[in-house]
Each structure stands twice: as C-alpha cells, then as structure tokens.
Amino acid sequence: MKHLLCLNDWTTEEIIHLLDLASKLKYELKNGIRHDHHLRGKTMGMIFTKSSTRTRVSFEVGMQQLGGYALFLSSADIQLGRGETVHDTAKTLSRYLDGIMIRTFKQQDVEELALYGSIPIINGLTDELHPCQILADLQTIREKKGALKGLKLAYVGDGNNVAHSLLIGCAKTGMNISVASPQGYTCSKKYTDMALKIAETTDSVIELTHDPMKAALNADVVYTDTWVSMGMEKEKEERMAIFAPYQVNSSLLASAKPDVIFMHCLPAYRGYEVTEEIIDGPCSVVFDEAENRLHAQKAVMVTLMSDSI
Ligand code: CP
Ligand code: NVA
C-alpha cells in the first residue's frame, strides 16, 4: 500500500517516474489520446476542511479523464465535521472507496487516515505540507528548464506548508534551494532537517537565510506564496508588516538569472507577496503550474489506484 502523505515517502526514482508519467498523460490529453481505462470503475473521496479552487477542480476533472469518479466530501456535510473520529472515518470510507484525497489542518489527521484506512491516501494540503503542489511545480520547472538537478530555486516569504514541501522536493531531485523568510517565520526544524538529510544523498544545496536578495542571487526559479495561509487570518495585519521586505518585485528579480521563471502556487495576492508586474509579466509561469496540478495529480492517482501499474 502506498500513499502520498509527504514527498519523503517516495524515492527520487519514484518521483522522477511520476513526473514522466505526468508528462505522458499531458501529451495524451493534448493529442486526443484517451486514457480513461486507467481508473475505470474506481471511486475516490475528496475530503475538504479548507477551501480550494485548483486542488478540488483538478482532482475531480483528472479522475473523470481517467475513467473514474470523484466524490466531494465537505467537512461541513460529513460526520467528521461533527466530531466523528478520523479512525472511524478511515475504516468506514475504506469499505466504499478506492482512495481518499484530503485537505485539512493537521498533518497528523492525514497520517491517521492512512494508518487506520486500507486504501491509498493523498495529502491535498495540510498546515505542514503540500506535496501535490510541488509535484506539479517540479513538472513545470522540468518543462521550462529541461532538467531539475543543479538548478537553484529561491523561495521568498513564509516558511509554510508550500516551503516545507519545496525543501523536500528540491532535496529529492538534486535541486538547490535557498529559503528567505523573516525571523520567527522560518521553515520548521522537522522539515529542514529532513531535507538536509535527503540532500546528503542527492548533493542538493540547502540554504536558509533572512535575506531575500541573497536567496534570489543567480536563481533559476523564484517562488513565493501568500503571507497569510488558510487558518492564519487573525494574524493578517501583523504579517503584512513583517513580510513587506519579502515582496517579489522587479528589483528582487534583477539579482536572479536573466532567464529566471517566477512561480506561485496560487491563490496570489497582487501587491503583497508579488507585484502585478511580475506575476502578470513574461517570466511568470503560474498558470502552467496551475495546469500541471491536473497532470501531476493524474499521475499520482494512476500510480496509487490503478490495478495495472
Ligand atoms: N495551489 C492550491 O492548492 O490552490 P487551491 O487552494 O485553489 O487548491
Ligand atoms: N500556503 C497556502 C497555500 C494555498 C494553496 C495556504 O496554506 O493557505
């Protein structure tokens, strides 16, 4: 039984294989080659206790393109939202479904779902991690740059779920990553140590700094995310002031490589973490990145749920 709870669950080879499958599925879709045999007759539940545009739509559409059916389970409607345990939910849903994608607050809940259930679990974002996003990001970088190993990605902003998964994804694929975040908002020790450990075997260089210019220096990719993640709305005002020097704008990008690409997982807040000029400008690949959620996640679902792979 395999899950996608954290990118560290997968080997470098498995990640590269997944990216190859994502590219193949993308090619097939664009060229009218049907691939709805992969998950014919399969049903996946999608539990959401947080909002989503990309994750919800790309998983649902992706499942349909693969011949299966995706069931939207809002926590406002299922008993989990009224206090039924993750344990009982996992055991019950395992009797009906072939897999579960879950977006929720606690990483521990996703891990418990995998522990007590008997079907593959996909992490669609927690407070700590966002692995599906980073698979789509790696696919996008590989498409734009032709390779991953040895490239430098600069992540500028909050040391959040996206930053944690980027640390792991870059370490796994031999990319170098520099994370610039303010004091008190750095990546957690747990995921920094995890990435440093992985990097020992892949020669990835991992740098943590408070200086956005240092991070962006000679970067091939500059990446940012919202300063106020879901669940942190109460800290909004305070965060806006603290993060202001971490905005991705043209003066920051001037220290990156001339062919730098700008990435953002979206949703974006123009004028805060990134200027309109950059996100809507020629180096931005944010909508390719959003599109690749579909292809990368289809590859995840085929890998975890297909009988023939
Ligand atoms: N990037 C991302 O996960 O977007 P949604 O919150 O819209 O799913
Ligand atoms: N860090 C953001 C990502 C949204 C896709 C959040 O958790 O809200």
Image (cartoon, helix red, strand yellow):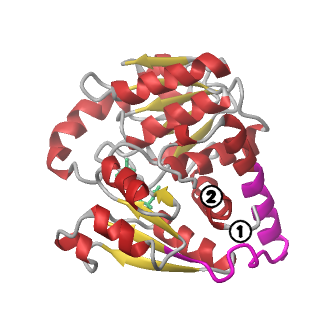
* Residues at discs 2 and 1 in contact (Cβ within 8 Å): no
Residue 46, image x, y percentages = 44, 71
The picture places residue 223, in percent across and down from the top left corner, at 51, 37
Gap in angstroms between the C-alphas marked 2 and 1: 13 Å
Rendered view: 125 above or below 275: below
Judging depth in this view, the residue of 158 and 198 nearest the camera is: 198
Q: Name the side, left or right, on which 129 lies relative to 63.
A: left
Q: Look at 64% across and 37% down and name the residue there.
A: 11
Which residue is found at the position 41% from the left and 30% from the top? 191
Say which mark, if any, is on residue 101. none
Location of the C terminus (image quadrant): bottom right
Element marked by disc 1: loop
Name which of mark 2 and mark 1 comes first in the sequence: 2
Q: Which residue is mark 2?
A: 300
Q: Is residue 248 magenta?
A: no
Position of residue 220 measured from the top left corner of the image (x, y, whole percent): 65, 29
Residue at image location 32% in from the left, 54% down from the top: 109
Can residue 40 be spotted in the picture?
Answer: yes
Amino acid at circle 2: Val
From the viewer's perspective, tell me whether residue 80 is left or right of residue 98: left
Point out the stretch of residues depicted in magenta: 20-44
Residue drawn 64% across the image and 27% down it: 175
Relative to residue 244, is residue 241 drawn left or right? left
From the image, tell me which residue sits under label 1. Answer: 307
Q: Please name whichever residue, 87 or 29, is drawn nearer the observer in this view of the structure.
A: 87
Q: Which mark is in front, 2 or 1?
A: 1
Residue 250 in sight here: no
Residue 149: name its quadrant.
top right
